[in-house]
């Protein structure tokens, strides 16, 4: 625990030092320019400060992810020999693997549907295309090619969005 706090203090110290250096450079630039340029630099200063804040937050998030990564717990026995107790049991890792397989399958299905839609768009000549929506008792048919193009584009956009989201989930998943 002590090491984690020391590391956090060090990271905070480094971030503050970088921020001070950047702000000093910006202030020196502002002092070296005339009043007209100062207003432009002020806007630039604001954006640089915002960028530096985002960078510091991103670095804190990275460090938090490293800290929350799976680390074994070390306990000392009576004989002063360290005993490593893993945080994840074999069962929990297998369960995570099953969840990952479900996520991977979802990604593959979405990619297949996207490929099918692309093939459909290529094969479409605009004259034989129909869309039918039906329930148990009613059905609705559309033959208008412009309307169907809008629907296809909407479906394609939704598929791309879902694929990107699922791909990010697959990449970020930890077993």
Image (spheres, grey):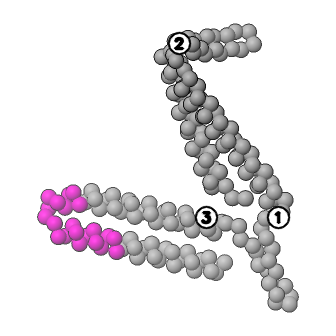
Contact between labelled residues 2 and 1, with CB atoms less than 8 Å apart: no
Pointer 2 residue: 127
Q: Is residue 44 above or below residue 84?
A: above
Q: Main secondary structure of the magenta part?
A: helix
Q: Quadrant of the N terminus?
A: bottom right
Residue 150 place in picture, x, y as percent? 50, 22
Give the label on residue 65, or none.
Answer: 3
Residue 160 place in picture, x, y as percent? 56, 38
Residue that extends furthest to the bottom in the rendered view of this protein: 79
- Numbered disc 1: secondary structure: loop
What range of the chain is rendered magenta? Answer: 21-41
Give the label on residue 89, or none.
Answer: 1
In front: 137, or 113? 113
- Numbered disc 2: secondary structure: loop
Magenta-drawn stretch contains 22? yes
Q: Which mark sits nearer the N-terminus, 2 or 3?
A: 3
Using the rendered view, name the quadrant where residue 112 is placed. Answer: top right
Residue 53 place in picture, x, y as percent? 42, 63
Q: Residue at x 57, y 44 (%)?
A: 164
| C-alpha distance separating marks 2 and 3 | 54 Å
């Amino acid at each position: 625990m002590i090491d984690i706090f020391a590391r956090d203090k060090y990271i905070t110290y480094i971030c503050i030092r970088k921020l001070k250096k950047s702000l000093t450079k910006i202030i020196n630039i502002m002092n070296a320019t005339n009043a007209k340029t100062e207003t432009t630099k002020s806007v630039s200063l604001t954006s640089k400060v915002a960028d530096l804040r985002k960078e510091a937050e991103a670095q804190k998030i990275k460090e938090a992810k490293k800290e929350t990564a799976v680390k074994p717990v070390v306990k000392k026995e009576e004989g002063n020999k360290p005993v490593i107790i893993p945080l994840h049991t074999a069962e929990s890792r297998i369960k995570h693997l099953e969840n990952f397989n479900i996520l991977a399958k979802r990604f593959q299905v979405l990619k297949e549907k996207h490929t099918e839609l692309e093939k459909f768009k290529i094969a479409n000549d605009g004259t034989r295309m129909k869309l039918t929506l039906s329930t148990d008792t009613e059905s609705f048919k559309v033959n208008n090619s412009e309307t169907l193009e809008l629907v296809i584009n909407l479906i394609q956009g939704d598929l791309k969005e879902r694929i990107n989201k699922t791909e990010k989930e697959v990449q970020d998943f930890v077993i």
